[in-house]
Amino acid sequence: VYLLGSGTATTHEAITSMPEITETAARASGALAFARAGMRPVDVDVVEVYDSFTITVVLTLEDLGFCAKGEGGAFVSDGRIAPGGAFPLNTSGGGLSYTHPGMFGVFLLIEAVRQLRGEAGARQVNGARTALCHGTGGQLSTAATVILGLDAR
Amino acid sequence: MSITPPLPAIDPDTQAFWDGAKRGELLIQRCTQCDEHQFYPRLRCVRCGGAVQWIRASGDARVYTYTVVHRAAHEAFAPLVPYVVALVDLAEGPRMMSRLRVTPEDVRIGLEVRVAFERQSDDVTLPIFEAQTR
């Protein structure tokens, strides 16, 4: 598994200092990672994002460019992110459905690598060759995006 | 409230703010160089690095966004549910988080509010916000 691109960004510390409460640092970190990987959101097969809360996921997907701002709720509806759905997201179950012991970010990377190696068992996304992991820290403050793949670029 | 809620730790950076709250004054910082207002309290101006001084804010604010808490985060807050926690934009500019003394039915984005104070202990009086009455 290769690291194809990564990006980090920070916008604030306290939530009261967040420049725009519906836009996170994922916008900047995602743009960096995609540019460095030479990829676009449509090129990603598996997505693993930090899910401290439901809203974190919705904002992150919007800011990474998987859907337009304001459309994240509809985007994840109707089974699209369910097992077998069209948009493989948090295939381990995520922090909300599986476990959140703190420092959950490494679990995102582990799950992505398992998917890319074809070691994910019953939850395997068939044919997965690229994956994106995204961590959020602070109070929606800091963002780190990593894009992984089976093919060196 | 019969059960003491978790209270903020007061330190040298925030002492003036809490002293002001005890007197019923909402204090924020203003930069002596660029006149920018800031809250929460910090050692220097986050915009230009200049020295800051404390000023008394008007106490007028407007609701930027809010959430309604139905499940108390601490047993001391249980008698208050459902209660409103909001980000309010002070007339001077800074945004702060506070509980509102406004019902979930009456709160809305853009609501004009004004600071009020609730004593919690000998050291801590909390600023909260209530609807402006004209």
Image (spheres, helix red, strand yellow):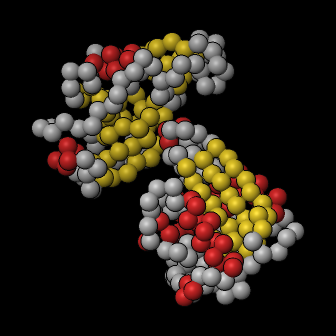
Instruction: From the top left corner, tell me how far across and down residue B34 is, in percent.
Output: 64, 16
Query: A54 left or right of A144?
Result: left
Q: Quadrant of the C terminus of chain A?
A: bottom right
Identify the residue at image location x=42%, y=17%.
Answer: B12
Instruction: From the top left corner, tell me how far across and down residue A86 is, in percent.
Output: 62, 83
Q: Quadrant of the N terminus of chain A?
A: bottom right
- The residue lying toward the viewer, choosing from B63 and A73, is A73
Count every numbered label the image shows and give the total.
Answer: 0
- The residue lying toward the viewer, choosing from A59 and B11, is B11
Q: Can residue A145 be seen in this view?
A: yes
In the rendered image, which quarter is residue A68 located in?
bottom right
Identify the residue at image location x=59%, y=13%.
Answer: B51
Instruction: From the top left corner, tell me how far across and down residue B39 is, in percent.
Output: 48, 27
Q: In this view, does A61 lie above or below B105?
A: below
In the rendered image, which quarter is residue A127 located in?
bottom right
Query: B12 left or right of A61?
Result: left
Q: Is residue A62 visible?
A: no
In the rendered image, which quarter is residue B20 located in?
top left
Query: B49 left or right of B40?
Result: right
Query: B9 left or right of A98?
Result: left
- The residue lying toward the viewer, choosing from A87 and B27, is A87
Instruction: From the top left corner, tell me how far across and down residue A90 is, in percent.
Output: 55, 72
* Residue at the extreme left of the image, as rendered: B2
Identify the residue at image location x=52%, y=29%.
Answer: B93
